[in-house]
Image (spheres, grey):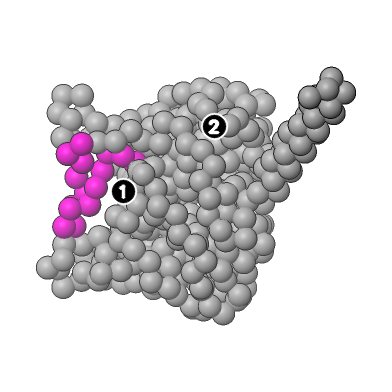
Amino acid sequence: MTAALRKRTRRAACALISTSLAGLANFAAHAEIVVTANDGKMVLENGSAVVRKQPLPDTVSVIDFTDGALKLLGEVPAPASVVGPPPSVAIAPHGAFALVTGAMKLDPADPTKTVPHDKLSVIDLKSTPPKVLATLQAGAGAAGVSINRAGTLALVANRSEGTVSVFTISGRTLAPVGKIQLGDAKSGPSHAVFSHDGATALVTRDGDSKISLLTVDGSKVEYAKRDLSAGIRPYDIDVTGSAAAIVGNVGASSGDNDSISLIDMTAKPIRVVTTVTVGQTPEAVKMSPDGNYVAVTVMNGSNKPSASPFFNDFGLLKVYKISGTDLTPVTEAKIGHWCQGMVWSKDSKYVVAQCMVENELIAFSFDGKALNKTSTLKMQVSPAGIRTAEP
C-alpha cells in the first residue's frame, strides 16, 4: 500500500469513527431513558417475601425506552430495595444523574434477614457504563425520593424513622441540610413529591394513613402541621402539572378492593376530592405527562399464597382518565406477579411496568383506548424501583 493510500485510508477510518460517535451522541441525546433500581436480595416464595438463598448484588440499570422498545444501555452495582414505593429512583431534570435509595440491607448478624438501610446513591447517567458519583446517608428505611423541577432540592422519605431527609443540589453534588420529623418510627413516611411550583411537598405515611403537607422556601422545608386523609395506607404518590396529584392506597392486604385518590392541588387548602376502588393493592400510580391519564399497577392478589381465596395468577396494569376531579376507567392489561412501578413515555403514548417474579419490564403502547404490548426486557436482578426524567 502506498503512503498516499494509507493516508487516505486513515482519514476515511477517522471520518467513520467520528460519524459513528456523533451518531451515538445524537442517539443518547434523543433516547427516552428509564432508570430502574433492582433488588438482588429478595424473592417471593408462595406469598412471602424472603431473602434469596444466594443473594445477588443490587443494581441500577439505564434503559432506552424510545418508541416503546426496551433496550438495556448499562448497569452499575448500588443499594436498592423492593421495600417501599417504586419511586425509589429520581432523575435530575437535565438527565445528568439519578438518585437511588436503598431501604433495606442484609442483616450483618443474620444474612437470612434484612434490616433498614439509609443509603442514597448519586448515579452518573452520562458516563458509559453509568457510575456511582457519591453515596450519602438519608434515614433508616430510605424509600421514595424526588427532585424539584428547579433541580436544587431533593427529599427522601425514611420509612423506619418517621422522617423526611432534605438535600440541596448544586450541579451533581448533594449536601444534607436536615430532617423533618413527621411522626414516630411507625408512621411510615413512604414517598415525598414536590408540587409543580416547588412551594409545597406531599408525603405519604402508610403507617398511620396520612398524607402530610410540607412548605418549601428555598432550602427551608417545614412540616405544615396539616395532614390529608385519602384511604387506608397511602403509599405511592405522583404529581404532574399544577392541577392534581394522585395517591395509591394499598390497604390492609386483606383481599379487599383498595383505592386510588385524586388530590386537588388548586384548592385552597389542598384537599382530596375523589377516591375510586381499583383492586387489590395498587402498588404504584403514575400520571401521564399530558395530565390526562393515570396508570396503576395492581397486585391483584398475585403476591398472595396460591391457596389464598384472594390469589390471582396475574397482576393488572390499569389506566384511568382524569376529567376535572373525576377518575374513569379506560382499559387494563394483564401483567406478571408482584409487579412494582411503571412510567410513561414523554408523549404519553407508551407505558412500561416492572415485575419482580418474572424479572422483567413490559412495555405497552396506549392510544387513549387500549394497551398493547410492544416489548419485554428480561433483567438479571429483580426490578423494584423506576423513574424517568419528569416534566
Does any portion of residue 77 appear in the rendered image? yes
Furthest-top residue in this view = 3
Residue at (58%, 32%) from the top-left corner?
A: 128
Q: Quadrant of residue 177?
A: top right
Residue at (45%, 65%) from the top-left corner?
A: 296
Residue 347 coordinates in the image, percent (x, y): 67, 62
Q: Nearer the viewer, mark 1 or mark 2?
A: 2
At label 2, the amino acid type is Pro
Furthest-front residue in this view = 1
Element assignment for label 1: loop
Vertical position of residue 134 compared to residue 214: above or below: above
Residue at (16%, 57%) from the top-left corner?
A: 46
Q: Where does the N terminus fall, quadrant-wise? A: top right
Q: Quadrant of residue 289?
A: bottom right
At label 1, the amino acid type is Gly
Residue 190 coordinates in the image, percent (x, y): 40, 45
Question: Label 1: which residue?
Answer: 207
Vertical position of residue 5 compared to residue 243: above or below: above
Marks 1 and 2, how far apart at CA? 38 Å
Q: Which residues are magenta?
A: 39-54
Callout 1 crowding tier (Cα within 10 Å): few <14, some 14–19, many ≥20:
many
Question: Label 2: which residue?
Answer: 129
Callout 2 crowding tier (Cα within 10 Å): few <14, some 14–19, many ≥20:
few
Residue 260 coordinates in the image, percent (x, y): 43, 66
